[in-house]
Image (tube, rainbow, N blue to C red):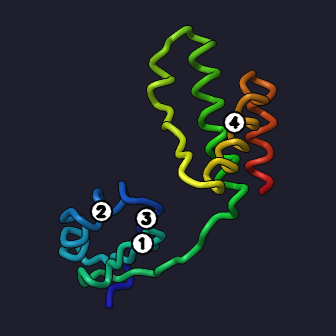
Amino acid sequence: MSSKKILILLPDGVGLRNFAFSNFVEIGEELGWEVIFWNQTPFDLSSLGLKEIKLQVKPRPFTDLLKRAKINSELSHFENKWNDPVYSSYKFSPSFSGIKAILKNSIVTILENSSKNENGLKQLRYRLKKV
């Protein structure tokens, strides 16, 4: 076993594509490095013969709502600030399939509407850091 190690953090599918599904591991091992993945994706890297530390961490539900509200508020703020409608094209259409989705989207909309200016965004970012 090598004393030189590389720990790759995989929070999402982009990291899978860039590191796990490429020849990155082969190149690293050829250079004498042991490559280990800190994997927070649902994909099982051990099925590919890769070494992983699997994490099953889920954020609190309110954290996800704050994150969605922050993203939508920033997009609305930038659209108004630079008078550029391109920012609204990055917003995802909310799902209204079920009472739970309707409730979540209502909370996000309330948070977003109260945070469209610079001060509101600062408050939202502060709350997101504290959760």
Outermost top residue: 83
Q: Position of residue 22 (x, y in %)?
A: 21, 62
Q: Amino acid at mark 1?
A: Pro
The CA distance from mark 2 to mark 3 is: 9 Å
Q: Amino acid at mark 2?
A: Phe
Q: Quadrant of residue 130?
A: bottom right
Residue 19 marker:
2
The CA distance from mark 1 to mark 4 is: 29 Å
Disc 3 or 1, which lies upstream in sequence? 3
State the residue position of label 1. Answer: 42
Using a 10 Å C-alpha cutoff, classify the residue at mark 1 as few (fewer than 14 neighbours), some (14 to 19) or many (20 or more). few
Disc 4 or 3, which lies upstream in sequence? 3
* Depth check, front residue: 116 or 26: 116
**What count of labels does the image hold?**
4
- The answer to whether the residue labelled 1 contacts the one labelled 4, judged by CB atoms less than 8 Å apart, is no
Disc 1 or 4, which lies upstream in sequence? 1
Q: Amino acid at mark 3?
A: Leu
State the residue position of label 3. Answer: 10
Q: Secondary structure at mark 1?
A: loop
Q: Secondary structure at mark 2?
A: helix
Question: Looking at the image, is 36 positioned above or below residue 41?
Answer: below
Using a 10 Å C-alpha cutoff, classify the residue at mark 2 as few (fewer than 14 neighbours), some (14 to 19) or many (20 or more). some
Which residue occupies 18% across, 75% down?
Answer: 30
State the residue position of label 4. Answer: 109
Question: Is 6 displayed left or right of 19 in the figure?
Answer: right
Using a 10 Å C-alpha cutoff, classify the residue at mark 4 as few (fewer than 14 neighbours), some (14 to 19) or many (20 or more). some
Question: Looking at the image, is 81 positioned above or below residue 27?
Answer: above
Q: Amino acid at mark 4?
A: Thr
The CA distance from mark 4 to mark 3 is: 30 Å
Q: Secondary structure at mark 3?
A: strand
Outermost front residue: 98
- The answer to whether the residue labelled 2 contacts the one labelled 3, judged by CB atoms less than 8 Å apart, is yes
